[in-house]
Image (tube, rainbow, N blue to C red):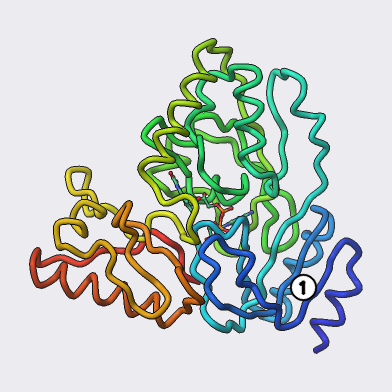
Amino acid sequence: MILQSELTLIPDCEFFPDRDLSSLTTFKLASRADYLEVKSVAALQKVVPLLHKYKKDYLVLGWGANQILPATSDKLVIHLSFPFDNKYLETLRDEYVVPASLGINHLTGHAVKFGMKGWEVFTGIPASLGGALYMNAGTNLGEIGNIVKDVTLVTTAGHLRTEIMNSESFTYRHNHFVKPGEIIVGATLKNQGQDPALPQKIKDYLDYRKTSQPLATKNCGCVFKNPCKEMQAGRLIDLLGLKGLSVGGLRVSPKHANFMENTQNANWDDFRALVDTINLEMNHFYGIEFELEVKIP
Ligand SMILES: Cc1cc2nc3c(=O)[nH]c(=O)nc-3n(C[C@H](O)[C@H](O)[C@H](O)COP(=O)(O)OP(=O)(O)OC[C@H]3O[C@@H](n4cnc5c(N)ncnc54)[C@H](O)[C@@H]3O)c2cc1C
């Protein structure tokens, strides 16, 4: 309670006790927790040390496109909502200093307008910039790490730390610079020149995604990691004949077997049960089990 009242005294912070979070993830599983919206970097610099002082666990929720939140959680859910003037992206720049809360769809819009070379890598991925950097989001066109010059974070002590990216900063769907408890607040993206073919490349890739993924459903993207490059998780699940399999309000997508669709009001238990069923079959037929690609706090 003391923590709660201290948080509400910080300017640019809005605290929502026991909030319904189901609308804040793309999967829309039933979930509740205390929720804090932070509207400036300065506020976040006050919030993070305070949480450490009171030993309060927390997690960051970006667009919630890659997180499964449990039905209830003792962790404080932090969501960043930093100011950003969209006019910034109406001009071609040498480099781009952008906040972590920005949706990367805005960056794709800029890429199409100016033909930003190399910016096709995150086409169609639902994400905040912070979530995309944390996950090193990417497609078979490449990954976001390729176009990042530096990333700024708030440390657990509330200081700002800017990390210059190098060849070891990112690996597949993984970053190597966010330390436990740190929160990404922004990044500088590179202008690598212009590519007149880029708008068409992006359009073609969006069309391809529409036909291959169940984009109109409530889902969390790919649920499982591919066991290796040669073994696609979706293909393996398909071979087991599990497309369309339902548990509670969840089903394995008939369109792409590594996606689960929330067809009714699915919850955490349905998710666990469907994951366990798939892994039981995997173990039985292939002697291996999948690892989750989605994050579970
Ligand atoms: C339909 C669909 C298609 C998808 N396709 C792809 C795809 O092609 N390629 C791909 O890579 N992914 C894909 N995904 C997964 C997802 O879009 C990405 O993982 C994306 O990067 C998640 O961003 P987010 O803002 O939603 O992060 P969240 O899901 O909210 O968070 C993901 C992780 O990042 C951490 N995080 C978020 N913001 C911050 C921050 N500011 N500082 C520190 N940590 C932070 C969270 O705590 C969590 O651990 C897809 C998802 C959906 C629903």
**Left or right of 144 on screen, residue 74:** right
Quarter holding the N terminus? bottom right
* Residue plotted at (21% across, 51% down): 235
Choose between 184 and 207: the one closer to the eye.
207
In the displayed structure, 251 sits above or below 62; it is below
Q: Secondary structure at mark 1?
A: helix
**Left or right of 241 on screen, residue 65:** right
Q: Which residue is mark 1?
A: 50
Query: Horizontal and vertical percent for residue 66?
Result: 49, 58
In the displayed structure, 96 sits above or below 12; it is above
Looking at the rendered structure, the kind of residue marked 1 is Leu
Is the residue marked by circle 1 packed among few (<14), some (14-19), or many (20+) residues within 10 Å?
some
Choose between 107 and 160: the one closer to the eye.
107
**Left or right of 268 on screen, residue 140:** left
Query: Horizontal and vertical percent for residue 234?
Result: 26, 53
Q: Quadrant of residue 250?
A: bottom left
* Residue plotted at (68% across, 47% down): 100
Q: Quadrant of residue 13?
A: bottom right
Query: Horizontal and vertical percent for residue 94?
Result: 69, 18
In the displayed structure, 23 sits above or below 272; it is above
In the displayed structure, 106 sits above or below 263; it is above
Query: Horizontal and vertical percent for residue 179?
Result: 55, 57
* Residue plotted at (83% across, 87% down): 2
* Residue plotted at (58% across, 20% down): 116
Q: Quadrant of residue 150?
A: top right
Residue at the bottom extreme, as displayed: 1
Ligand 1 contact, mark 1 (Cβ < 8 Å): no
